[in-house]
Amino acid sequence: MSPLSKNFVRASLIYFFIAAVLGIIMISMKSYPAQLLFTHVHLNLLGWMSMMIYGVGYHILPRFTGKPLAYPKMGEVHFYLANTGLVGLVCFRPFHPLAEIFAGVQVISVGLFVFNIWMSLIPPKPEHE
Ligand code: HEM
Ligand code: HEM
């Protein structure tokens, strides 16, 4: 497994643990602030779920076409943007325009993943052509 995949899986596991702790805190409260729900939901869905899919996806999806990942360096940029975007988004959700900036960073990171995997799934041309 590449360092890129491992880093995404590690980040995903950390977010899962933090989100689960927040979930328990929410259960124990009579009512919880919207910011806490937002953080729980997005650490789970953009952190745990998406980053696990990024990590496993970078490893396995290019193998379906027998090609390496199209742009490994872009994968590294994706890693930093996805993490910066998520942490920034949950920390600065109530603050504008910071929330929009980090949301934008998150969306760009998603775009990089989509593009990279899309290009990696294009089958190689047969050599005798
Ligand atoms: C230890 C694990 C977890 C705990 C204790 C927990 C706890 C909670 C609590 C207390 C709420 C607020 C809803 C309510 O007041 O009834 C909530 C909402 C939510 N949780 Fe979790 N959760 C956990 C794991 C997860 C996981 C693994 C996911 C997704 C992968 C998830 C996704 C969500 C979502 C999407 C909502 C918002 C639902 C809505 O829109 O009403 N949670 N969770
Ligand atoms: C660029 C990434 C994302 C941004 C900027 C974003 C932003 C938001 C915002 C603004 C809300 C409304 C709550 C609030 O006003 O605080 C929300 C709710 C929600 N989002 Fe996201 N989201 C993103 C990605 C995702 C993804 C990828 C998922 C699922 C896989 C997701 C699942 C949810 C759910 C379930 C809720 C409802 C939570 C609740 O019960 O309040 N979001 N999101």
Image: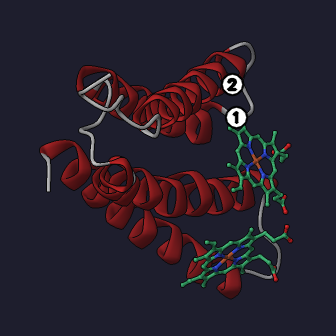
Badge 1 residue CB within 8 Å of ligand 2: yes
Binning the other alpha carbons within 10 Å of mark 1 as few (below 14), some (14 to 19) or many (20 upward) gives some
**Is the C-beta separation of discs 1 and 2 under 8 Å?**
yes
Measuring 49% from the left and 54% from the top, which residue is drawn there?
47
Q: 1 or 18, which is in the foreground?
A: 1
Residue 31, above or below 128: below
Q: 123 or 111, which is in the foreground?
A: 123
Measuring 32% from the left and 32% from the top, which residue is drawn there?
126
Residue 117, above or below 33: above
Q: Quadrant of residue 37?
A: bottom right
Q: In the drawing, what numbered circle is on residue 107?
A: none
Q: CA distance from mark 1 to mark 2?
A: 5 Å
Q: Earlier in the sequence, mark 1 or mark 2?
A: 1
| Residue type pointed to by label 1 | Arg
Query: The C terminus lies in which quarter of the figure?
Result: top left
Number of numbered discs present? 2
Left or right of 91 in this view: 21: left
Provide the residue designation for mark 2. Answer: 99
Left or right of 4 in this view: 44: right
Query: The N terminus lies in which quarter of the figure?
Result: bottom left
Badge 2 residue CB within 8 Å of ligand 2: yes
Measuring 24% from the left and 21% from the top, which residue is drawn there?
73
Q: 122 or 70, which is in the foreground?
A: 122
* x, y percent for residue 102: 59, 23
* x, y percent for residue 18: 43, 66
Q: How is the image coloured?
A: secondary structure
